[in-house]
Amino acid sequence: MDRAQKEKLVDELAQIFESSGVVVVSHYAGLTVAEMQDLRARMREAGGSVRVAKNRLAKIALEGKPCESIGSLLTGMTVLSFSEDPVAAAKVSEAYAKDNDKFVILGGAMGETFLDPAGVKAVASMPSREELIASIVGCIGAPASNIAGAIGAPASNIASILSTIEERGEAA
């Protein structure tokens, strides 16, 4: 890799560190190519990405970035999982680590906040952006459906009372 390629890679990594909601650093020693492709596919499906880069270049790219604190984690065979959604990369990484014991989460960063492995697990247990939006929409929609039910209830109650009176009248 020549100097121009290294500079380009450092710029790409710097952009990733700048724009990502969460970055998770993991060891992947012993993973097969198929297992790594599976991780990439799962991450892509969740809206994130996986990147393997030389630790030295990643440390250069981290300088001055909000997640600069993860530089200490970049030793050995590391892989970076990241996403704009502050939860997606952590969720996928945590789920993958449960399925594959060769994939070990070292920690990560959420903006300027350093995350140890327990922190990544805590972030992974949070609802994703889409889940939060769905629950908010559900909360907003529930009162409207209750109001519609309350407005329609008196009419249905009157109809059932009239029906009962009519049945009694026929029976008599």
Image (cartoon, rainbow, N blue to C red):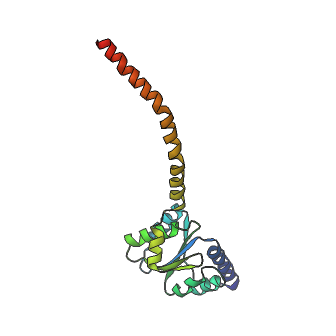
Q: Is residue 36 depicted above or below 74 in this figure? A: above
Q: Is residue 5 left or right of residue 81?
A: right
- Residue 117: x and y in percent read 45, 79
Can residue 36 be seen here? The reply is no
Left or right of 67 on screen, residue 151: left
- The percent position of residue 52, horizontal first and vertical second, equals 54, 77
Q: In this view of the protein, can residue 53 be seen by the observer?
A: yes
Answer above or below: position of 147 versus 172: below
Locate residue 125, reporting x and y percent: 44, 67
Residue 87 falls left or right of residue 18:
left
The residue under the point 70% across, 82% down is 4
- As drawn, the residue found furthest toward the right would be 4
The x, y position of residue 94, in whole percent, is: 44, 71
- Choose between 36 and 144: the one closer to the eye: 144
Location of the C terminus (image quadrant): top left
Total numbered labels: 0
Q: In which quarter of the image is the N terminus?
A: bottom right
Q: In this view, does 106 lie above or below 167?
A: below
User: Which residue is drawn at the image coordinates 33% and 17% (left, top)?
Assistant: 167
Q: Residue 34's image quarter?
A: bottom left
